[in-house]
Image: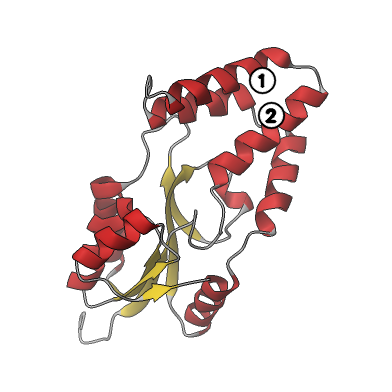
């Protein structure tokens, strides 16, 4: 209770692997590569490819690869349009239904994601916490803290948290502490095992 009134319920939803079945960064960069190859912008193709390879070889970290590759990819209108169209075909209908049900029930629904903030508005219309354009990623403890501030500043009661990835374990633990339902959406084996070790067993499989 806040000032004698019930707190407004809230839901927090992850993007990649949760609301969308595919990884938005990979889709964005692959879409960019296709466009740059067709335009013979081979310098951009070379930079993105070299960064991807360096990451696979462990020579650079994920965030270094991500933000440098996004700069090389650019954000032309055509690229954003094609990316948005591809991602719309990857919506997880079960998660989208939960989101709509929460909104219909009067929830405030927050998208909280490590995805790059400049393209997320193509994929989500509503409140969001995302990574800034140049990083760092909003993940792990930083994501937990940001969501906790959003909840506390708004006087909200967290009722639902949905994610797929072990990077969100701190937020899942926070959500459970607040009494929320925590749904793990089609996790990869490593993430599934880690969540299970922490007592999270509500898995939503496609």
Observer-nearest of 152 and 132: 132
Quadrant of res 111? bottom left
Mark 2 and 1 residues: CB-CB less than 8 Å, in contact? yes
Task: Look at 29% across and 80% down and name the residue there.
Answer: 7
In the image, is 176 to the left or to the right of 166?
left
Query: In terms of image quadrants, where is residue 152?
Result: bottom left
Task: Locate residue 19, reporting x and y percent.
Answer: 52, 63
Residue situated furthest top in the rendering: 43
Is 94 on the left-hand or right-hand side of 194?
A: right
Question: Residue at (62%, 43%) from the top-left corner?
Answer: 27
The foreground one among 71 and 153 is 71
Q: How is the image coloured?
A: secondary structure
In the displayed structure, would residue 13 be above or below residue 115? below
- Residue 105 position (above or below residue 80): below
Is disc 1 placed on a helix, strand or loop?
helix
Q: Is residue 43 above or below residue 199?
A: above
Measure the alpha-carbon separation of dots 2 and 1: 6 Å
Residue 53 visible in the displayed image: yes
Decide: is 76 above or below 19: above
Quadrant location of residue 148?
bottom left
Sooner in the amino-acid sequence: mark 2 or mark 1: 2
Q: Residue at x 43, y 67 (%)?
A: 185
Residue beneath the point at 65% across and 53% down: 87
The reply, left or right, for residue 120 in relation to residue 84 is: left
- Residue 148 in sight in this render: no
Mark 1 highlights which residue? 45
Within 10 Å of disc 1 (Cα), the crowding (few <14, some 14-19, many 20+) is many
Local secondary structure at mark 2: helix
For disc 2, the marked residue is 33
User: In the rendered view of the protein, which quadrant contains the N terminus?
Assistant: bottom left
Please rate how many residues cluster around mark 2, counting C-alpha atoms within 10 Å: few if below 14, some from 14 to 19, many from 20.
Answer: many
């Amino acid at each position: 209770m806040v000032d004698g009134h019930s707190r407004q319920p809230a839901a927090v939803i992850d993007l990649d692997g949760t609301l969308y079945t595919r990884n938005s960064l990979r889709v964005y960069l692959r879409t960019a590569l296709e466009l740059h190859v067709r335009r013979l912008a081979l310098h951009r193709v070379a930079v993105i490819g070299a960064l991807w390879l360096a990451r696979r070889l462990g020579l650079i970290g994920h965030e270094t690869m991500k933000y440098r590759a996004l700069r090389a990819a650019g954000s032309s209108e055509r690229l954003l349009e094609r990316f948005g169209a591809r991602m719309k075909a990857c919506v997880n209908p079960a998660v989208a239904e939960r989101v709509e049900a929460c909104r219909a029930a009067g929830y405030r629904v927050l998208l909280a994601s490590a995805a790059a903030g400049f393209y997320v508005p193509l994929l989500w219309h509503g409140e969001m916490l995302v990574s800034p354009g140049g990083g760092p990623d909003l993940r792990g403890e930083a994501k937990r803290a940001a969501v906790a501030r959003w909840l506390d500043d708004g006087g909200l009661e967290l009722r639902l948290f949905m994610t797929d990835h072990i990077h969100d374990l701190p937020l899942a633990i926070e959500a459970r502490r607040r009494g929320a339902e925590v749904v793990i959406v089609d996790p990869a084996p490593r993430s599934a095992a880690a969540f299970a070790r922490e007592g999270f067993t509500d898995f939503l499989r496609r």
